[in-house]
Image (cartoon, rainbow, N blue to C red):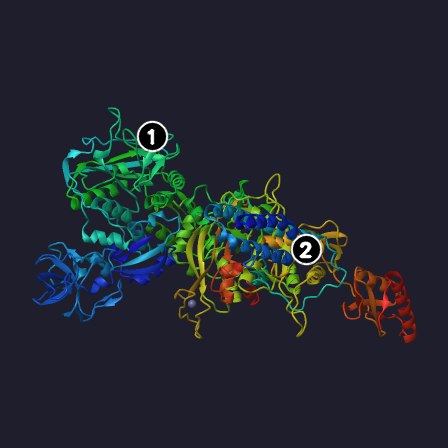
Amino acid sequence: MSDPQADIENKLAALREAYGPRFAAAETEQQLRDENAKILGKKGELTAILKEMGKVPGEARKAIGEKTNALKQEVEKAFEVALAALHQAAREADLKGRPFDLTLPGRTPVGPGHKHPISMVREELIGIFRTLGFGVHDGREVELEENNFTKLGFPPDHPATDMQDSFWTTSGHLLRTHTSNIQVRAMMGHKPPMAFIAPGAVYRRDDDATHSPMFHQLEAFLIDEGVSMAHLRGVLRAFAERFFGPGTPVRLRPSYFPFVEPGAEVDFGCTFCKQPDGTRAGCTICKQTGWIEVLGCGMIHPVVFESCGIDPEKYTGFALGMGLDRLAMLRYDIPHLRLMFENDPRFLAQF
Amino acid sequence: MKASYRWLRSLVPQLTAPPEELAQRLTGAGLEVEAIHRYGVGAAACLVAKVVSTRPHPTKSGLKLVTVDRGAAATQELVCGAPNVPEPGGLVVLAPLGAYLPAKNMTIEKRAIAGVESEGMLCSEAELGLSDDGDGILVLPPGTASAGAPFVAAVPEAEDYIFDINLTPNRPDCLGHVGIAREIAALYSYPWAPPTPKVATLSGTTIESLGVGVRIDETSRCPHYGAAAAEGVQVKASPLWLRYRLASLGVRPISNIVDITNLVMLEFGHPMHAFDLDRLERGAPGSALISVRVAKEGETLVTLDGVERTLAADDLVIADGQKAIALAGVMGGKGSEIHDGTTRIVFECAYFEPRTVRRTARRHALHTDASHRFERGVDPSDIEAVLASAAAWTAKLAHAQIAAGTLHVQGNVRFPKTIRLRAPRLRALLGVDVPWTEALDILVRLGNKLVTSTAATAELEPPPHRPDLTREVDLIEEVLRVRGIDNVPEILPAIHPTPDSGGDEVFRERVRAAAVTAGLSEAIVLGMTSPAALAKVKAEAPTVFLKNPLAEHQGAMRTSLLPGLLESVSQARRREQPDARLFAMGPVFIASAEGLPTEPLVLTAVLSGTASFRAYLSKAEPVDVWDAKGAAETLLFALTGQKPTLERGELPPQVHPRGGAWLQVGGKRVGYMGPLHPDVVDAFDLGAHPVMIVSLDLEALRIIGRAAPKFQAIPKFPANARDISLVVKDVVPAGDVQDALKNAAGPLAEDVELFDRFTGGSTPKDHVNLAFRVRYRAADRTLTDAEVDAFHEKARAAVELRFGAQLRT
Ligand SMILES: [Zn+2]
């Protein structure tokens, strides 16, 4: 007559001896998984042992149960280790395998890709301003406080910096909050007259449905003797005609930017609800006003000239800045800012 | 800033422009009215009614039947569920049939409530759109009006137009109704006089006899401190008109004293504070009860919001004889707060230096109505008017006795400087002739004092409420703003064409065009990323870190565009878009020992999923390294006019060692390409589809540039092509065979092209079948077939010998 307890213990001991070599023998992941299933699966060996537990009397059953469970955990762990080792071996084999034949010819792409809508607008605007005589000035994104704020007339602690909540680096520089830093760089590096535009990425500490912490602006400025508000309006008119279409109304509202005086915000007649007679019916894009706010501008503040070593009595100038992201949204009917930064292939393929 | 049209009209009685028109005029002058809201639209249709009797509802407990007198002896019975229906004689507000209550989007109709017909409704403030209070119906104080009177005739403040004005930070004068009214008067050329507060009844006591004295320790940070005192104050709810005025302007009514400080702030734009005099502690005998000083290190103050704040030595505080009682210009202290039992109060009206308030507000992350105004600069000249106004209201609404005399202690007072305005400068800057007298008239209407003037210059002293007027150009803007910018003509300037400075944009446009030609679409990648994300792509560790990132995963400036691109690929896959051919171009950021980081421009491209547009109707195949090679070649040819060579030295860690290669042009490394390294694939969980990358060092390519193409003569004589199909060991690179064929075929072999490659079928194991087409051509004659056959046979023999290649027939 067999002793069920001894019988089970013998089987457990045999299995404990066997599982290691059996896992080690597996050469592929599938083999390893199969072997694991033979032990731990529903019809596995250990499962079968568990079924025999009923034959063991009460107290001994508990001790055997614990032993069985311990073995189960041991096997599970060994399986994970063996699997990781197989993966590691496969990875090493893959990395060390015979190199691909890179002398085979490259496949020439068939169809063209797509520029990002922000870039399309950027290139279009640069084209417009180039025809007016402006040149492009290089930019940089990490900037000195001096060029981004101080020389533009932002005093420290001034409430205007409320509008400019900025990213600072641990070295005390900041991510430029506008492309207006290029005004300073241009004035420090060139003698008037000058007419520059400067496009590029800028950063502010806003991140919500309508703000991205990185966005894009284009700055334009003209400095010469005798530049007046009338010239600013003339350039805005030319911009409106070429970008939004002939006859587009332009409206300036006085506003405040520390580095221009007088300063203004500029609205253009809404292109979405324009009627055949040239009037605007109002729509959701213009919030029923018929006007779209597009840019800020003004006469360069004498304090900016002074801080850059240019005589404000001799030279005057205007500056204007606009958001490329917003212009791209208007140009291509893009309803949400977020779409422009998600890089969804279906979005990019539309432009 | 919210502004009440009704209030503005009471301050400028001549104003007749309807709200829309006024809003346009203000917007045109730089006070941008973003929206006009109607307040109390529902109230306008309602009547005052007097309760005649009430009886229980016949079937429903909790409901009452209320008979009201609605004027002209007409009565009606209504069903009402409110718990607070007053006794007979009480006044309530009746919305009659047809009244529309927008707050509840409800039109009053005849309807049966639990079987009883009701033709109207007794309204709560919430239903009238006056406040959030919907707990019970609005019960009017006795004597408000007679039954039947329109409700808004009894309480006019219940109906208004509220302007949302987006004020620029340079116009603190318009943070109060007086300032906006003064601006309106200037814009419309109406006469202007500031309101004169009604004089309060004076008690026998003086402010000094109440023991109120003020000492300013920080004289430059607090140039003015004014105080007034009152006793016998009865703290209670404000009358309806005041509560509605505050509520319409977004301020919650609290109690009469607190409401008065808010009312006066909204009137003058000058914040005030009220202390409970009996909660102030005295100091040493002879010392002032109130002092303006900096906080002691470690001093604490529980502010009105219940937060205990540890003060910094830079914080300006108001203190009694023992301790800080308020954060100057930001928030009062809980300990001296007005409460129901307050009977004696001290009002504070001061001028604190904007920067002082700004620093403290920032330090304690408090942005209050008071700090908002002090930070921008309040009018230092209206302190006595503000205190008088508050005192007058306190006498009237809190039945208080006002102590005689107000204190006005001065610190370092700044006196205004005059500004010189020159007529020629005005013309030069605006580009339009403005009549000189008109310009001066505008400036005077805005409160500037004309000190002296000639036909070409004037000296003006700006008013104390306009801290933004400091230079000539500021006055020029005022003239422009009030006259209207539309009066400036549009003149296109003749600009000297300015050459580019730097040339980066032209280069970027070339790169962008090249990438698009290479079948890539442009992605935009954030400048910020995290050290962890860069480590995941095995990129160089970042060296430029943000002090105040919005999130941990945006704490460093990128050294690689790969994390952003791979995240885009990953996101596209989650949207079931496995096919992506993206490129991003932009600077990476590398700290320098001194000065600003360098920002070299790089381009990185990612090809993933299937090469879906491989050929017409052919099966889509997963992208492989030869797609990456093709993209790299196309890009580099467009940028340099040269084909890159591939070099497989020690590879960058981003690429798979079996398939990666450096890209070289003219012997210089200009980038790399290859399958994404499997560790990176795992880190971004991109294993479902292959991912290839191409990365270019655009700074190196910018230097190499592209020489203008040089014309080559077009061949006059035909080519003669021969195909050759070879079986070689698969370890032999096809390019070696190709090169060997080209060399062996002689100088007249113009071109060797691999046009097919296959394994399997009759091809032996570990072998591959390569099919080449060799084109022979001479520049000076047509080659004969025999000549070509001879060249070709020589070529075949050579490769057979070198590679053990077998000719396949
Ligand atoms: Zn529209």
The type of residue carrying mark 2 is Glu
Q: Position of residue B232 (x, y in %)?
A: 15, 39
> Disc 1 is attached to a residue of which chain?
B
User: Which image quarter has ligand 1?
Assistant: bottom left
Query: In this view of the protein, can residue B451 be seen by the observer?
Result: no
Residue type at mark 1 is Asp
The quarter holding residue A135 reads: bottom right
**x, y percent for residue A314:** 53, 48
Check disc 2 and report the residue beneath it.
A27
Q: Pick whichever, B10 or B132, lies toward us.
A: B132
Whether residue B126 is visible here, answered yes or no, is: yes
Residue B473 position within the rendered picture, expressed as x and y whole percent measured from the top left: 44, 48
Front one among B607 and B260: B607
Q: Which secondary structure lies at badge 1?
A: loop
Quadrant in which the C terminus of chain A is drawn: bottom right
Please indicate whether residue B664 sits to the left or right of residue B40 in the image: right
Q: Position of residue B678 (x, y in %)?
A: 64, 54
Question: Label 1 to label 2, Cα distance in Å?
Answer: 85 Å
Furthest-top residue in this view: B285
Please give the chain letter of the residue carrying mark 2.
A
Mark 2, other Cα within 10 Å: few <14 / some 14–19 / many ≥20 = few
User: Camera-side residue: B296 or A184?
Assistant: B296
Residue located beneath label 1 in the image: B217
Which image quarter: residue B506? bottom right
Q: Is residue B351 left or right of residue B654?
A: left
Q: What element does badge 2 sit on?
A: loop
